[in-house]
Image (cartoon, rainbow, N blue to C red):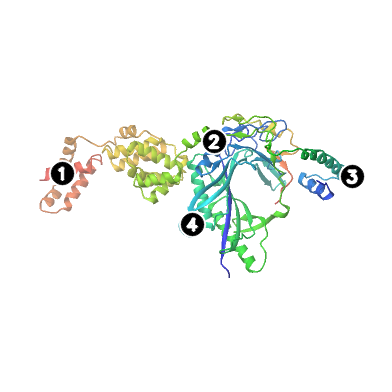
């Protein structure tokens, strides 16, 4: 069998995290009763006029600048016409002729070793469609337009991807960039990141691409990986059998693990694109673009490098923290308060992760003040509370957002700083444990540890162990 | 551009409408007339003239990202021929 290489390009759709839709002021909030986040504009009533949400343009530019794109200063919207009940207007407003961003790239690890660039052909703004729900009882289709008009970016790559692993890394990189740039939450389960995958195969070293197929709306990393592996294998089998790959759109069924043909490109839709007459063109000034560039948030690569180089965190710990924006925010706030990145990271990957796990909470649903963790670490490192107490305080913070200092005070968890009080407590312990004292004096080292344990117990763990040890040594000598 | 029967059939399928033979003839000749009229524009020399993308010389009409109440569901569904609960109902869509 000949050796083949995979040629793959992705169209990634991401929902922008604006408060309102792209052309009207309806909320973009997920959920809600069907057709309750809908107005006369996004439901396509005649005689209405769409107006562009300025945040959508800003987020699109931010995304373009974060992916090394050139911003198309004069860009505009076009109508893509098709009849399907998920679009009430019978057209989708999109950008065909002059997309807002062009010619960018994202760097990934090549399957052949080293780094490689996946070129981004363009990024354009468009509106999402509604949702069709099949009602088995009435054998009809119900339509919910709540998502209709939610702003989307479509990020179109060049066919620079040569394996399923590369595809997954590319989408992961994009997701991280989109999240760190603050333009999308990329929740795949809510459909805010999904990909159309174009795949073809060709003999290794060939200059000519094979016939490609497209699989639409794949919404998990696992499914993207699986779909590319499976579809490329199917194409190679066809070629090896002397058959032809047909250019077609296929549906990927992730539960069954295979794709099947939907409609062939021969009778592909003719979208009859034309310039959108209801929306004046956009003209983005140099100053506007520069102001966005200046205020770009720190992007994943830079952030990770800073955590490793400046903070001395391991690549592994950095990766764990950077997997979640709420953890990144908590970490940075905690470092700001403690000035101690190592302890901050250890707490987040230790106690915080443990609490999240124990309570089955997603990081974005943490409810406590970000300052609290830093305050707890400071109390601990300043010798004001014991490690055990610190964990208890954090539990209370996590569950009820209590104020750490007040909680310590109220529950009498503060460490004893009064040396004479500690001394008298230790003296009591020595009186009560004459046997151990004698054993120690006759050379049994283990008895010393026993006496420390008894003293700590008598002090209910509220005295610093170092202080107790020091006093004990004094009294026994 | 010559309008023939096949093109009319294609336009029917794109527009999701069905015409009878008489209607196809009528629509065909009307579209032919319209295209012939518009073809006159090709007689103009448009070298170096940038394609216009909007009929008014305005750009950058924006709206702030502030939520306003959506329309009441009853209003949205008021003219729907078929509805169920808060949804529009359409014939079954099959892939």
Q: Quadrant of residue A330?
A: top left
Could you give the CA–CA distance between mark 4 and mark 2, rounded to whole angstroms?
32 Å
Per the image, label 1 sits on a secondary structure element best described as: helix
Mark 1 highlights which residue?
A: A472
Q: Quadrant of the C terminus of chain A?
A: top left
The reply to whether callout 3 and callout 1 are in contact (CB within 8 Å) is: no
Q: Chain of mark 3?
A: B
Query: Which residue position is annotated with label 3?
Result: B22
Pointers 4 and 3 in contact (CB under 8 A)?
Answer: no
> Label 4 to label 1, Cα distance in Å?
62 Å
Are callouts 4 and 1 both on one chain?
yes
Spatial CA distance of label 4 from label 3 is: 62 Å
Residue on which the image places disc 4: A110
Camera-nearest residue between A306 and A31? A306
Both on one chain, marks 1 and 2?
A: yes
Mark 2, Cα crowd under 10 Å, few <14 / some 14-19 / many 20+, is some
Q: Is the same chain shared between marks 3 and 1? A: no
Judging by the rendered image, the residue that carries numbered circle 2 is A58
Q: Quadrant of residue A14?
A: top right
Q: Are marks 4 and 3 on the same chain?
A: no
Image coordinates of residue A166 in percent, x first then y, are: 51, 55
Q: Earlier in the sequence, mark 4 or mark 2?
A: 2
Mark with earlier residue (1, 2): 2
Marks 4/2 same chain: yes
For this view, does A387 lie left or right of residue A111? Answer: left
Pointer 1 indicates a residue of which chain?
A
Find the distance from the CA under tag 1 to the CA under tag 2. 66 Å
Spot occupied by residue A111 in the image (x, y as percentages of width and height) = 49, 59
């Amino acid at each position: 069998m000949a050796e083949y290489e995979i040629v793959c390009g992705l169209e990634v759709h991401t929902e922008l995290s604006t408060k309102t839709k792209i052309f009207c002021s309806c909320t973009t909030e997920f959920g809600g009763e069907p057709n309750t986040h809908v107005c006369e504009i996004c439901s396509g009533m005649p005689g209405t006029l769409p107006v562009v949400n300025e945040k959508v343009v800003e987020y699109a530019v931010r995304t373009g600048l974060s992916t090394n794109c050139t911003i198309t200063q004069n860009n505009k919207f076009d109508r893509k016409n098709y009849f399907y009940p998920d679009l009430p207007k019978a057209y989708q407003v999109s950008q065909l002729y002059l997309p807002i961003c062009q010619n960018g790239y994202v760097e990934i690890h090549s399957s052949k070793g080293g780094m490689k660039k996946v070129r981004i052909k363009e990024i354009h703004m468009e509106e999402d469609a509604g949702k069709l729900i099949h009602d088995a009882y009435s054998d009809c289709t119900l339509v919910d337009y709540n998502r209709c008009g939610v702003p989307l970016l479509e990020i179109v790559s060049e066919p620079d991807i040569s394996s399923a692993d590369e595809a997954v890394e590319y989408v992961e990189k994009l997701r991280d960039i989109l999240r760190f740039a603050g333009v999308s939450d990329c929740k795949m389960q809510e459909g805010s990141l999904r990909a159309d995958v174009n795949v073809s195969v060709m003999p290794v070293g060939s200059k000519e691409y094979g016939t490609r197929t497209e699989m639409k709306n794949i919404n998990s990393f696992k499914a993207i990986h699986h779909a590319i592996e499976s579809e490329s294998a199917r194409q190679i089998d066809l070629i090896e059998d002397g058959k032809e790959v047909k250019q077609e759109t296929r549906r990927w069924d992730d539960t069954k693990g295979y794709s099947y043909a939907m409609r062939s490109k021969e009778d592909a839709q003719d979208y009859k694109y034309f310039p959108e007459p209801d929306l004046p063109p956009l003209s983005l000034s140099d100053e506007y673009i520069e102001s966005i560039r200046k205020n770009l948030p720190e992007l994943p690569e830079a952030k990770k490098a800073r955590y490793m180089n400046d903070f001395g965190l391991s690549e592994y710990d950095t990766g764990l923290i950077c997997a979640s924006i709420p953890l990144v925010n908590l970490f940075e706030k905690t470092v700001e308060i403690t000035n101690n990145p190592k302890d901050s990271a250890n707490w987040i990957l230790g106690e915080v992760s443990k609490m999240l796990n124990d309570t089955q909470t997603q990081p974005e649903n943490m409810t406590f003040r970000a300052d609290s963790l830093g305050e707890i670490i400071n109390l601990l490192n300043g010798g004001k509370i014991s490690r055990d107490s610190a964990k208890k305080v954090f539990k209370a913070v996590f569950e009820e957002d209590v104020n750490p200092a007040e909680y310590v005070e109220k529950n009498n968890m503060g460490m004893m700083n009064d040396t004479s009080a500690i001394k008298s407590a230790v003296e009591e312990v020595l009186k009560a444990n004459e046997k151990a004292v004698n054993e120690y004096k006759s050379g049994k080292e283990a008895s010393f540890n026993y006496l420390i344990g008894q003293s700590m117990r008598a002090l209910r763990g509220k005295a610093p162990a170092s202080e107790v040890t020091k006093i004990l040594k004094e009294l026994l000598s | 551009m010559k309008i023939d029967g096949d093109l009319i059939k294609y336009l029917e399928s794109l527009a999701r409408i069905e015409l009878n033979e008489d209607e196809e003839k009528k629509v065909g000749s009307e579209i032919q007339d319209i295209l012939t009229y518009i073809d006159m524009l090709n007689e103009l020399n448009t070298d170096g003239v940038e394609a216009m993308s909007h009929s008014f010389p305005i750009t950058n009409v924006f709206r702030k990202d502030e939520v306003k109440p959506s329309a009441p569901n009853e209003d949205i569904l008021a003219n729907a021929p078929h509805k169920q609960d808060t949804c529009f109902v359409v014939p079954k869509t099959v892939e």
